[in-house]
Amino acid sequence: MSDEPVKYVLPESDIPTHWVNLMPDLPGDPSPPLNPGTGEPAGPDDLTPIFPMGLIQQEVATDPEVEIPDEVRDVYKRWRPSPLFRARRLERALDTPAHIYYKYEGGSPAGSHKPNSAVPQAYENKKAGVRRLATETGAGQWGSALALACSLFDLDCVVYMVGASYDQKPYRRSMMETWGATVYRSPSDTTDAGKSQSSHPTGSLGIAISEAVEVAAKDPDTNYSLGSVLNHVCLHQTVIGQEAMAQMGMAGEEPDVVVGCVGGGSNFAGLSFPFIRRVLRGEAKTRFLAAEPAACPTLTRGAYRYDFGDTVGMTPLLPMYTLGHDFVPPPVHAGGLRYHGDAPMLCGLVKAGLIEARAYAQNPAFEAAVNFARNEGIVPGPEPAHAIRAAVDEALAAREAGEERVVLIGLSGHGHFDMSAYDDYLAGRLEDIEFSEADMEAALARLPEAPAIA
């Protein structure tokens, strides 16, 4: 066994001082979000009812870097910088010449990358005098992170948890409630949006978003907070990629391919955007690979159109790959990836050919996750299991080609609250649920009237 290091750790002083804003480097002229009532580009006035001005300024920022407040960096010190590992045992198990690295975000108190954005969102709302935050959560990772952040900044928190995950992951709900949050199974009977979707008992992120936005819109003391998709969330997550870049330098290697899972896009954006900026500036030739669930294949099967970010139609229209805002994905275990759309910045990069997307069924993803756990010791969440599957395929392709290849994985969180999914896989009960082309076509037929995207 090699005596070369397998873990690369940065000192606390190397926590990034700024977030990376990819917006000024994007190719072409990015399509703006639209006000659904007027059809005009949505501006700050469209967001002020549910967001504080500090976050709105980050959402529309045009500077290449945005300073991280000291108060946020102080909280980041509880788990950042996160470690980078070289997966030597997995490499040997695959008999591959590829070098596999993974950036592990599971050491945060909530067990994932999500607090990287929850903390600055709670901070900006507290600074603006807001008393309560309302949000949605798919697998429970984002709800856990926001519950944590609200407890640290003395804010109330209400979480609408997608019904399928509420049933599958009861201890995620317990974690949120331990941090003081109120958790509702979505669709619920506490909102008009939830009542209107009672025919979809498994729920979806789109439905849960509608419920949380409704609560925020009706209460002047409550703002809305979300864990993915919008620019400011992707911005906050870029601490991951900046640290990974420095750690790859410590390892003396440059990634040939950066791999992450994609539901709304925050984890993938956080790892990849600092690397993508180098490619856009002609400083590197890295490939980027986004892994998504075959049951909800937004990037690989969706239409590139303007659509609502939620099911009921309360948000601005976003330019993105979409399966249709009222498409309800089947209840796969990777609840955090069950979203009908994706981050507009990410979608634009897919459209431009800078990011490749692949879709994986549940069983191949969990096969790779179990192999990873038995070699590296970490039990991955169902969401990053898809990224691990894609990375394993890259490593096997390198073996077949007889070439070295450096693969960097975003391991966005652990699977300690997802053991029912592993139970199903190990017992042979896990189903590879089919994607419904007919349901997507029906949902796409109901898209709102909006200009075509170039």
Image: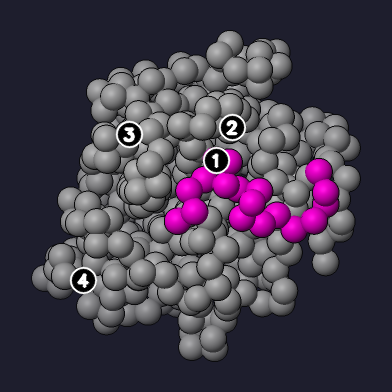
Q: Is residue 311 visible?
A: yes
Q: Amino acid at mark 1?
A: Ile
| Magenta stretch prevailing secondary structure | loop
- Image point 30% across, 51% down: which residue? 105
Q: Which residue is mark 3?
A: 155
Residue mark closest to the camera, 1 vs 4? 1
Q: Are marks 1 and 4 in contact (CB under 8 Å)?
A: no
- Magenta region: which residues? 37-54
Q: Which residue is mark 1?
A: 50
Instruction: Identify the mark nearer the N-term, 1 or 4.
Output: 4
State the separation of the CA atoms marked 1 and 3. 15 Å
Measured along the vertical axis of the image, is residue 127 above or below residue 245? above
Residue 236 pos. (x, y %): 41, 58
Is 186 or 327 nearer to us in this picture?
186
Quadrant including the C terminus = bottom right
User: In which quadrant of the rendered view does residue 442 lie?
Assistant: top right
Residue mark closest to the camera, 2 vs 4? 2
State the separation of the CA atoms marked 1 and 4. 33 Å
User: Residue 14 — which label?
Assistant: 4
State the separation of the CA atoms marked 2 and 4. 39 Å
Instruction: Identify the mark nearer the N-term, 3 or 2.
Output: 3
Instruction: Identify the mark nearer the N-term, 1 or 3.
Output: 1
76 on left or right of 45: left
Q: Are marks 2 and 4 in contact (CB under 8 Å)?
A: no
Q: Secondary structure at mark 4?
A: helix
